[in-house]
Amino acid sequence: MIIQKNISLKNFTTIRIGGNSNKIYFPESLEDISNLKKILLLPKTLIIGKGSNIAFSDNGYRPDIISLRKYYNRHISIINNKYISVSASISCARLAKFCHKQSIAGFEFLHGIPGTVGGALAMNAGAFKQSIWNSVDSVNVVNKAGDIKNISCKKVKTSYRNVDKNNILLFLDTLLVINKRKVFDANLLKKYSMHRSLTQPIKQWSSGCIFKNPSKNTSASLLINSLNIQKRRIGGIYISKKHCNYFINDGSGSCKDLIQLIKYVSKLIKNKYNISLTKEICIYSNSNE
């Protein structure tokens, strides 16, 4: 297992924001994860994958961090033509491509999600009116006693961009149900990919969507778009012209800039529509900030 100290956290987020770490652990095996049990059980320990939907304080993050970047236990396999077994460290895009090659329908929406399967499970990520937990049969996790357990989807409460992780510290892998009632469309993955490239700033530094949609019928991006503030910027963070629920870091942006822009947009939406937007991005800071 690799351990690094006092390194920049910018490279551990897709929006490239953050000060320095205290200590980052890089487990490479299940044995390494088991050896990290005491650290996993600390309340402030943070577990990260590809780093989408997160940012760190400009002052860094002092509690321990566990990064799954070097975790080699990565697998995708089909079981009895009924399930897909996939490790949490696999990227959502890789899972979508695997299913496409196997002519399995229902997972194309994952192609445009920038994180890992574990990250998607943690927040019930989705796109095109689909969410990953709609296909979950069960998950293998490290629970809050530090033990590895298999949990049925029926025992995990989920909703839009939310998962009750009351007894879950870390997702290890999951069993996904193949819905044979869905008809495979060989062009759907390409269609979703083209739509994403046309409507999202995929080659710029962002965390993905900043705000959750207030409801199924109300889009955060449409609300922000109605404000006509597409050119708004604070410091090195600005609102994307392609998708106004994406905030872009031009390379000089700070966490302070990001927080100020979030507050600015939230206040305008509250004043105009009396709607309180909820952040989708998680911003981690030290307890004294």
Image (tube, rainbow, N blue to C red):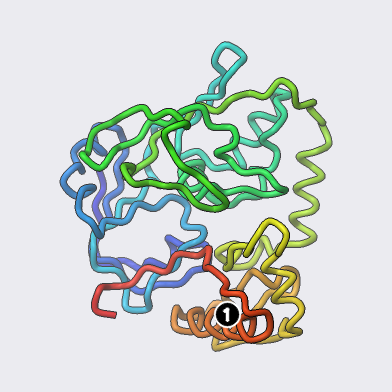
| Residue 58 % position (x, y) | 37, 78
| Residue 76 % position (x, y) | 53, 27
Of residue 289 and residue 213, the one placed in the foreground of this image is 213
Of residue 24 and residue 125, the one placed in the foreground of this image is 125
**What residue is shown at x 72% (from left), y 29% (from top)?**
105
Q: Residues within 10 Å of mark 1 (few under 14, many from 20)?
A: some
Q: Is residue 264 above or below residue 286?
A: below
Secondary structure found at label 1: helix
Q: Is residue 206 above or below residue 267?
A: above
Would you say 62 lies left or right of 206 here?
left
**What residue is shown at x 54% (from left), y 48% (from top)?**
159
Would you say 124 lies left or right of 182 here?
left
Image quarter of the C terminus: bottom left
Q: Quadrant of residue 102?
A: top right
Extreme residue toward the front, this view: 274
| Residue 95 % position (x, y) | 59, 35
Q: Which residue is mark 1?
A: 266
| Residue 194 % position (x, y) | 80, 51
Of residue 52 and residue 152, the one placed in the foreground of this image is 152
**What residue is shown at x 44% (from left), y 78% (from top)?**
255
Amino acid bearing label 1: Ser
Q: Quadrant of residue 283?
A: bottom left
Extreme residue toward the top, this view: 80
Would you say 228 lies left or right of 57 here?
right
Q: Number of numbered discs present? A: 1
**What residue is shown at x 43% (from left), y 31% (from top)?**
139
Image quarter of the N terminus: top left
Of residue 217 and residue 224, the one placed in the foreground of this image is 217
